[in-house]
Every structure is written in C-alpha cells, then in structure tokens.
Amino acid sequence: MKGLIGDKKFYKMVLAIAIPIMIQNGITNFVSLLDNMMVGQMGTEQMTGVAIANQLIFVFNLCIFGGLSGAGIFGAQFYGQGDKTGVQYVFRFKIIIGLILLALAEVILITLGEPLIQKFLHDGGSGGDLASSLLYGKQYLAIMLIGLIPFTITQIYASTLRETGETLIPMKAGIVAVIVNLMFNWVLIFGYMGLPALGARGAAIATVISRFVECSIIVIWTHTHVKQNPYIKGVYHSLYVPKALTTQIILKGTPLMLNEAAWSSGMTMLMQCYSVRGLSVVAGLNIASTISNVFNVVFIALGSSVSIIVGQLLGAGKMEEARETDTKLIFFSVASCLVIGAILALTSPLFPNLYNTTADVKHYATWFILIAAVCMPQNAFIHATYFTLRSGGKTIVTFLFDSVYIWVISIPIAYALTHYTDINIIYIYFICQFVDIIKCMIGFILVKKGVWLENITVDTGN
C-alpha cells in the first residue's frame, strides 16, 4: 500500500490541479442537469429531441478535444522544460486544427443534421411523438451550430492554460458562463420577463450566449496577462510552426484525434442501438447520462491531472518519479470513485422523479443510473490508464485501447442484443458497460510495463 498512497504534499499538489477542473466541470454538468430538467418540464418529446441533437454535438466536442490534445501532449512537456517558444508553436497548431475541425463540423451538421436525428427515432408510440422529437431536435441543433465557434476558441485557449499550470481562470470563466446559462435558461425556456416560452430553442440560445461569455473572459485574460502567459506575445504574428514539430504532432496527434472521433461516434452508435427499443429508452438514457456526468467529474478531473502532472515529469526527464506519481494518481482516482459511486447508487431512485415524464422513462433512468454507479470505479481506472498512455505519446496504443475496442467489442454486442434478442434493455445496458472490464486488464498490463515512459519533445526542431 505504501507505493499507492502519497504524502500530504503529493495530494496538495494533485488537488491544486484537479479541484479547479472538478469545480468547473461539476458546475457545468450541474447546470446541464438543471437545463435538462427545465427542458424535461416541457415534455418528453422536447427532452428527447434535445438529447439526440446533443449526442451529435458530443461527437464534435470530442473531435476538438482529440485534435487539441494531440498537440497538448507537446505543450505540457514543453512547459515542463521551460520552453516558451515550443508552447507558442503548439498554440498555433491548435488554432489551425481547431478551425479545420470547426469548418468540417458545420458543413456536416448543416447538411446531414436531420437524417442523423431520424436515426435515433424508433417506436415512440404515435407518429406525432416522433415528428415532434424530430422538430425539436432540428430547432435545437440549428441554434447550437453558432455556439460551436466560441466553444472551439475557448478550448484552444483553456487547454493551453491548463497545460501551463493555469487552471483557475478556465474554472472562473466556466462558473460565470454556467450562471449566465442558468439565468437565460430560466427566462427563455419558460418565457419569463415578458419573453415568449421557447422551450428547446430557448435552451440552445442560452447555451450559445454563455459560450460567448466564457470565450470572451478566457481570451481577454490571456492577452492581458502576458507575464503569466509569455507564449501569447506575438503568437498571431504568423501561424508558423516548424516542419519537424508539425510532423511530430501529426504523427502523435492524428491517432488521438481519430480516437476521439471514433470513440465519440462509437458512443453515439451505442445510443442508436439502444434507441431501437423506443423513445422511453432514449429519454431514460438522457436522464441517466446527465445525472452520472455530475458525479463523473471526479475521475474526469483526476484523468486530466494525470496528463498534466505526468506529462510535465516526462518532459523534465524524471521517469521514475513519473511512474511512482502515476501509480498513486490511478489508485487515488479509483478509491475516490468507490465512494462517489456508492453515493450515486444510494441516491439513484431520487433523480428521475425530478422530471416531468412517464413512469417508463423514470424506471429506465433509475436502473441506468444505478448501473453507471456500479461501473464508476471501473471507468475511473480506464480513464486514468488512458491518460497515462497518452501522456507519453502512445496515441496509437490509446487508439487501439479505446476506439478499436468500442467498435470491435462493445458495438457488435449491443447491436446483436438489441436487434436479435428480446433481452430487457436494462440487462443489455449492464452487459455493454461491464464488458469494459477487459479494457481494465489491458490498461493494467500496458501501464505496468511502462511503455508510456517517454519524453516526446526531443528532436522536434524548435
């Protein structure tokens, strides 16, 4: 146990990084929960339409995350070396890749949004229910496309700030944004202060406004605090990035971006498999995922801490310290989620009752939340091992570990069970979640072997 538990200084260092991320994500997810509940008060159809549209946006969000994270591996290690110019080059690369992904997403969602939403609409009872869900999903998505612009810019700046050790500003900007989001949700969804009740459209408008607010705060702070962010000075004089570094980022980052795209689309495909069992299942999964996301912030934040702390140690050439630190971080994440998962399991029957929806939806949601709670320690371990492998630039390994697994194992199982059996969807959902235990075993072996112990910033031509 001695090698698994750190001293007071260790946890103080970890929590200094993790807590701001945890607070930001926690508040964001909590407001998403309130947003979800407010839309849910308008009826199951509006809630389902919004959930499906958000599932499509989820794919874009993770593509941005993957595209920027590939470069971010280098950013964290350059910062660990004290290389300001290297961080600046990484920032420029993020701008280029972010704009490319944004343009692609806008074109795809504008042209294919409606048929993609229709893929999730099955056996919802009357045709009116399906038609209403489609209409609300289209209205919500059309407005949210505007919000992809500030979201992309925010991720470029905020990810760089975190990689250079500044986690408080993104957290503060996130807090302001969610407060703005919550206020406009209340006004626009229900139609207070003399405004019309816009329902799903109101939720989208509120989210877009909040994203512009968050983006403005982070961008303005970064450019007005050059001393804390020396890489930002002159960053827009050109978009030059050395060829050698560009090649390295593409080689390391492309598998990571493809991984996020394949994994997020895989998660969307899983949702589509579940959706053939009816709109009630889609609505129940929406409630469950929104609730569990609030609790998942613990292992999400600790995973980000792994990438930052271990990445900086690897960049500084402290391999043995990186190994020891990583082991303690993984143990801390799993142990924390044993407690958080137990709390979520005990409270799982309470949350669905906060929604204005049918008894079937509440029944499904309760069981889906309980399953998510039971699997939380498992997911915490997978998440931490994923970021461990990624911190050392093993992006091809993470691609196999993450995306290939979901498409080769999880999706075929879900498709076969939902289309060719009469097994209850609750059991199917549990099987598809628990099968990830195989990933735990693979992750354990890879981390223990130390294949990730590598400084990838050498010979990058900067």
Image: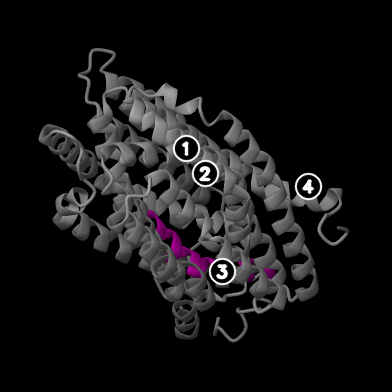
Q: In percent of the image, x 38 and y 56: which residue is there? A: 267
Q: Is residue 227 visible?
A: no
Name the mark on residue 371. Answer: 2
Q: CA distance from mark 4 to mark 3?
A: 23 Å
- Where are the magenta residues, as a range? 59-81
Q: Nearer the viewer, mark 4 or mark 1?
A: 1
Helix, strand or loop under label 2: helix
Q: CA distance from mark 3 to mark 1?
A: 38 Å
Q: CA distance from mark 4 to mark 2?
A: 32 Å
Type of amino acid under label 2: Ile
Name the mark on residue 73. Answer: 3
Q: Is residue 344 above or below residue 105?
A: above
Q: CA distance from mark 4 to mark 1?
A: 36 Å
Q: According to the image, what is the colour scheme of the structure?
A: one colour
Q: Which quadrant is home to the C terminus?
A: bottom right
Type of amino acid under label 1: Trp
The residue singled out by tag 4 in the image is: 12
- The quadrant holding residue 199 is top left
- Name the foreground residue: 340 vs 190: 340
Q: Are marks 2 and 1 in contact (CB under 8 Å)?
A: yes
